[in-house]
Image (spheres, grey):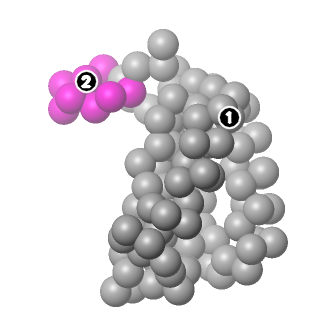
């Protein structure tokens, strides 16, 4: 069963194309994290928020990444970090074309 990790936080920027330039290296490194299947980057510049939604193969890998990523974000000065890990209902998600197969 795959697990969805949702993370968001307050951030002053960068957003849009500047965010791509600033975080492309990080994006590539995230692909190397154990059990990471995909990530969708999120941003709401008008509200000063950013984050991501991740799919991991196991709860343990999602939790391990969350602990590492939280420490990295807090060290970078991120404020109001929020996170949750959800079990994914693959059968219902498949009906709605959700890309959730763990492997």
Disc 1 element:
loop
* Residue at x 55% of width, y 48% of height: 27
- Is 102 drawn above or below residue 38 in the view shown? above
* Residue at x 38% of width, y 27% of height: 100
Q: Name the residue nearer the viewer: 28 or 7.
A: 28
Disc number for residue 46: none
Disc number for residue 94: 2
The furthest residue to the front: 21
Verify CB contact (< 8 Å) between mark 1 and mark 2.
Answer: no
**How many dots with numbers?**
2
Query: In the displayed structure, does residue 9 sit left or right of residue 91?
Result: right
- The part of the chain drawn in magenta is 91-100
Magenta span contains residue 56? no
**Residue 97 appears in the picture as rendered:** yes
Residue 20 in picture, x, y percent from top left:
45, 61
Q: Name the residue nearer the viewer: 70 or 25.
A: 25
Residue 42 in picture, x, y percent from top left:
41, 61
Determine which residue is flagged by label 1: 33
**Residue 84 appears in the picture as rendered:** no
Q: CA distance from mark 1 to mark 2?
A: 25 Å
């Amino acid at each position: 069963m795959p697990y969805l990790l949702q993370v968001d936080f307050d951030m002053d920027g960068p957003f849009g194309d500047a965010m791509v330039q600033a975080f492309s290296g990080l994006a590539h490194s995230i692909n190397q994290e154990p059990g990471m299947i995909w990530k969708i980057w999120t941003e709401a510049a008008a509200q000063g928020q950013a984050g991501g939604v991740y799919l991991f193969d196991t709860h343990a890998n999602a939790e391990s990444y969350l602990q590492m990523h939280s420490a990295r974000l807090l060290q970078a000065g991120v404020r109001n970090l929020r996170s949750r890990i959800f079990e994914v209902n693959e059968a219902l998600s498949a009906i709605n074309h959700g890309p959730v197969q763990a492997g």
